[in-house]
Image: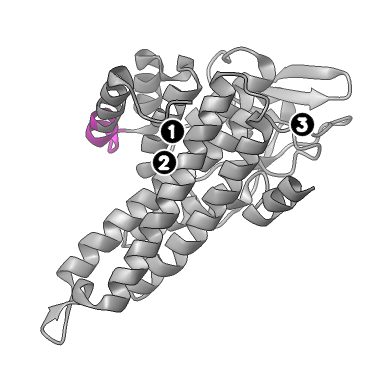
Amino acid sequence: MEFEFDEDQRLLRRMVRETVTKSRSQPEDKLWATYLELGWLEAPPVELAIVLEELGYVADPTPFLATATWFAPLAGRLPHGSGTGVFDGEGRFVLDADRADEVALLTADGVVVRDGKELAAERLSVFDPTLHVARVEVPDLVAGVPELALMGLAVTTVGSCRRILDLVVAHVKERHQFGVPIGSFQAVKHKAADMYVAIERAKVLAYFSALTIAEDDPRRGRAAAMAKAAAGDCQRVCFQNGFQLFGAMGYTWENELQIHLKRAKAGDLLLGTASRHRKALLA
């Protein structure tokens, strides 16, 4: 498998970065309309991963992740509007179920698509108030998590961790102690380096997962679990070191860092933590 992006993929990445940078301050409905107009939901797995990483970097507030990686692989099509899927067998923590136009349900009788308003999903109060997570009570649900959903969460978490590292690097260059930037201290450099290594490891595995899905490789299930586990490990390193290097200031509401810390943590918790997926790989 080729791990280097080709010219079209590099162009896509640059275009996505420019688009989200220019439009990140727009209202959510305008952002969603922009994504639909650009056709990002129709991207194949590797290109979709490129989009999701950049949306993770800016803590995208739209239902793009749930629509592209929770609804689409389950229903086999894009929704009429936004969508999500329930495939954990319980329906306890479903991404964007409270605002989805359509919800795909994995039941004992197969996949059933329901109107989102009919389900009356209950939005849950979670540590990230910008994240929509809801409970869906439907009988006869069965478990069967799509690989695309695991990959999507993994690469989105990588994007969040990239943003955490960038914010930390900028901060340690500006903050001075004993007359020098704290970024010049060896201990600080080591923590930043640990974050970078964790991000690169998780990123490689996330894109490997996308490649296996794109090529229908028989390793796709294990690759998705590896990517989700690596992303969970990555967020733990970035959360701990990023939080510490900001001197806990990053967890205040006034600082942008807290948004990305919460998104990274949510990416690990949704659909199973790193520990759960490592155990699944060993089993």
Q: Can residue 120 be seen?
A: yes
| 147 in magenta | no
Q: Main secondary structure of the magenta part?
A: helix
Work out which residue is located at the far front of the displayed protein and give it. Answer: 1
Magenta part of the protein: which range?
18-26
Q: CA distance from mark 3 to mark 1?
A: 22 Å
Question: Image quadrant of residue 246?
Answer: bottom left
Q: Position of residue 60 (x, y in %)?
A: 41, 38
- What's the residue type where badge 2 is placed? Gly
Residue at 51% x, 33% y is: 208
Q: Which colouring convention does the figure follow?
A: one colour
Residue at 50% x, 38% y is: 206
- Tell me which numbered mark, 2 or 3, is placed earlier along the sequence: 2
Whether tag 1 and tag 2 are in contact, CB under 8 A, the answer is yes
Residue at 64% x, 41% y is: 225
Q: Which residue is mark 1?
A: 52
Q: Which residue is mark 2?
A: 56
**Callout 2 crowding tier (Cα within 10 Å): few <14, some 14–19, many ≥20:** many
Whether tag 2 and tag 3 are in contact, CB under 8 A, the answer is no
Q: Can residue 128 be seen?
A: no
- What's the residue type where badge 1 is placed? Leu
Q: CA distance from mark 2 to mark 3?
A: 24 Å
**Callout 3 crowding tier (Cα within 10 Å): few <14, some 14–19, many ≥20:** few
